[in-house]
Amino acid sequence: KQRDPHQTVFHQAVEEVFTSLTPFLAANSHYAEHGLLERLVEPERVILFRVPWMDDAGNVQVNRGFRVQMNSAIGPYKGGLRFHPSVNLGVLKFLAFEQVFKNALTTLPMGGGKGGSDFDPKDKSDNEVMRFCQSFMSELYRHIGADTDVPAGDIGVGGREIGYLFGQYKRLSNEFSSVLTGKSLTYGGSLIRPEATGYGTVYFAEFMLATRNDKLEGKKAVVSGSGNVAQYACEKLLHNNAIVLTVSDSDGFVHFPEGMTELQLEALKELKNERRARLSVYAQEQGLPYHQGLSPWHVPCDIALPCATQNELDEADAAMLLGNGCICVAEGANMPCTIAAVDTFVQAQILYAPGKASNAGGVATSGLEMSQNALRMSWSAKEVDQHLYNIMTNIHESCLQYGHESGGFVNYVNGANIAGFVKVADAMLAQGLV
Ligand code: NDP
């Protein structure tokens, strides 16, 4: 905190993990030796670069580009790129730190990293996005590689951006390699990758409910966000005959009083992914109530899936959800709940899953995309989905292994943090002081 006093979200992420680890380290003191904890919070490398590009009016724009290569103890750095005006080094260090433990939980050989830019793709033309991506990759390409660092998408980086980034990497390196995941199917992408984070989050909610002999069918679910993760979380909820009551964006939320239908989901995908329009337009087109400036948490529900961004659900929201009867929260986004909100859920002993466990299906399927690229094969949607389901099952089992408390309550926060830590820490200790 003294070194980087302004990196508050990074401190928050570290505090959450280290709070879980404290009792575990007291009983396993060798993990606190060799500067292990100090090394875990210091990125192996940070790359910060200028990204100049020309807008459609012929003006030069300059953004900042970043790549945080946090930890490569168990594999090449792996983690998404975020394009959003709120991106800064502290945000990316928090995301990279979380990614280290999340990737370890998948059991696939992937280290942790994260990157991006303060560039805002909203309201930019396709040509502007392409010029930006080409400029961004013109610097990044020398720092990444299929066995070094394999970026993917995140907020503001979807199929379109990955395509432009991949094209520029290929051109500069004269190499067609698995250097990015989230690619389109036409050039090496994996089936089920777009769906994976949202589907995996719902699988995790299903497993948590099963520990209490409960199921998704008929449950009322409140979802935030309306991007990649939210769309496929809604899809999998509908597959399970759950009732989806909301989606949101940074301006407000749409309420589906009767529950979202399959047709309304298809219209949402078309609006967000093709027309790139706002939810206020969607609500108008669908004749649905739109609540400007509000978050969806005050809608009574059984299940809440925060799938938008960090710290979007605070202590008051958590209390409101509990008051309205919510029994299960699975994070699709990274750290969407504040520490006080998490404490509120854990104290109430409801089913609560931190993102590093419940949203790990996305990066896991990116790992499967890398495997398919290495084999020069592509697996069927059914095969990839089965792998995803099995990986989410194993992550849930790891959380149970380390998260059981007296009285039978499962603390998934401790479970995920300790299970991820043990794998990375063992590899770091084996590799000496690096
Ligand atoms: P998208 O860009 O596809 O969608 C982001 C959604 O979140 C949009 O609806 C956006 O609304 C909303 N949002 C973004 N910033 C804010 C904000 N400050 N306040 C309220 N709403 C906001 O991103 P993804 O769906 O890919 O990512 C969502 C979350 O999931 C992120 O936390 C990401 O790190 C995490 N995640 C994503 C994975 C993936 O595979 N894509 C994997 C694991 C985690 P608006 O359009 O108004 O900005």
Image (cartoon, rainbow, N blue to C red):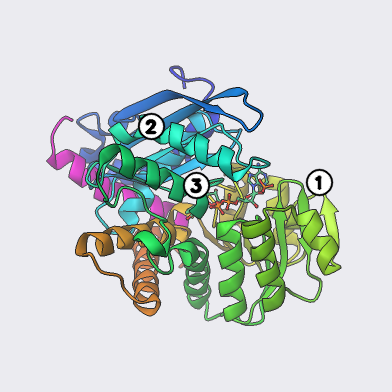
Compared with residue 46, is residue 416 higher up or lower down, i.e. above or below?
below
Foreground residue among 358 and 59 = 59
Chain-order first, disc 3 or disc 1? 3
In the figure, is residue 98 to the left or right of 387? Answer: right
| Residue 122 found in image quarter | top right
Residue type, mark 1 in image: Gly
Residue beneath label 3, please? 161
How far from the left and from the top, in percent, is residue 294?
A: 79, 49
| Residue 303 found in image quarter | bottom right
Compared with residue 104, is residue 195 higher up or lower down, i.e. above or below?
below
Residue at the image point whose x is 81% and y is 71% from the top: 257
**Which segment is the magenta one?**
412-434
In the figure, is residue 420 to the left or right of 333? Answer: left
Compared with residue 373, is residue 388 higher up or lower down, i.e. above or below?
below
Disc ID at residue 293: 1
Asked whether residue 411 appears in the rendered view, the answer is: no
Disc ID at residue 138: 2
Q: Cα distance, mark 3 to mark 2?
A: 14 Å
Asked whether residue 279 appears in the rendered view, the answer is: yes
Residue at the image point whose x is 53% and y is 74% from the top: 209
